[in-house]
Image (cartoon, helix red, strand yellow):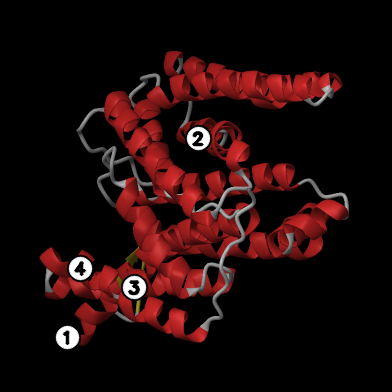
Amino acid sequence: MTSDIAAILAIDGIATGAVYALVAIGTVLIFTVTRVIFVPFGDIAAFTALTLAALDAKRFPGTGALVVVLACLATFIEIVSLTRSGELRLAPRALLFYLVLPLAVVGSAWLATRLDPPLAVRLVLALMLITPISPLLDRIVFRPIADGTVLLLLTVSVALHFALVGLGLLFFGPEGVRTEPLTSLSMELAGVLISGQTMLIVIAALVFSGLLYLFFDFTLVGKSLRATAVNRTGSRLMGIRPARAGTIAYLLGSLMAGVSGILIAPVNTVFYDSGFLIGLKAFVGAIIGSMTSYPGAAIGAVGVGILESFASFESSALKDVIVFSLLIPVLIWRSLASLHSEEEIEE
């Protein structure tokens, strides 16, 4: 391996790690606020890329039908919950957020398949179509069992992942897709050619990380999310609704997963089940950051990307084995360094 090859592999690893970093930060965000290890996170990223490819081909994506079904189910569950709690006066707001807005996005996507909007509009539509999926799944699947153990939430999350993979095969078929590059620019740095897509991936990861930092430190909503992450009971006593904080966390997480899917689609072929490996490798980075630290998750994800890049050069067949083997020493170290406490199960 020469220095030029090492530089190329490092740049490629940083770009891949930047995509993993977005997914890892979103995973940590959802986990700290809701205690849910959202396994389908990578599926949301893959669905975004596949949705964009369908819009590029002027086909109505299957995710539109998924949003319609989830919106109707979530609205029904929310209306029933409001009726039982005697808060039916909040029904108009529930209809707006759970039904009207998602259906308006689906209608816009359907209209786009009849027209020929520019790439920027298709990008926005793909993100808007994907963003409601996670909050709707939260309302339907996770919120009714929000007080369950982490193990129960994880089991349900894994089952949800397999359900989404099956739906992905139904919606998009077994063929992989690549979308057109977002930019054709390139530059040479120290004798190494860097594509504009790679620079865009890194810049997007830095920008979103910075915006997330500003959001948590300088906005009231961000501070409420941090309070919920630290102590759900205490935040509820201070007037913060954990359910609403969870919805916001899922919205932000979906947006970051969608952006990562759009960024990775032009450089990697995306299949209906590609999201699992994306999410799993990002989860390794989040574990390195102890599932509580956003900077730690980002650094760990970039490290996973660099390790994967060099491992693929040495042995492409064993690159995933090498990456996931990194979990063993990390988990052993975390187990020895952290204090253990059993979850209390209310009967």
Question: Which residue lies under the disc numbered 3?
Answer: 327
Q: Quadrant of residue 332?
A: bottom left
Dot 1 falls on a residue whose secondary structure is: loop
* Among numbered discs 4 and 3, the one appearing first in the sequence: 4
Whether residue 301 is visible here, answered yes or no, is yes
Q: Is residue 119 above or below residue 215?
A: above
In-front residue for pair 147/92: 147
For the residues labelled 4 and 1, the Cα–Cα distance comes to: 24 Å
Dot 4 falls on a residue whose secondary structure is: helix
Of badges 4 and 1, nearer the viewer stands 4
Amino acid type, callout 3 = Leu
Residue 250: give x, y in percent of width and height.
Answer: 59, 45
Question: Which residue lies under the disc numbered 4?
Answer: 321
Q: Residue 187 — which label?
A: none
Extreme-front residue of the structure? 347
Tags 2 and 3 touching, CB below 8 Å: no
* Among numbered discs 2 and 4, the one appearing first in the sequence: 2
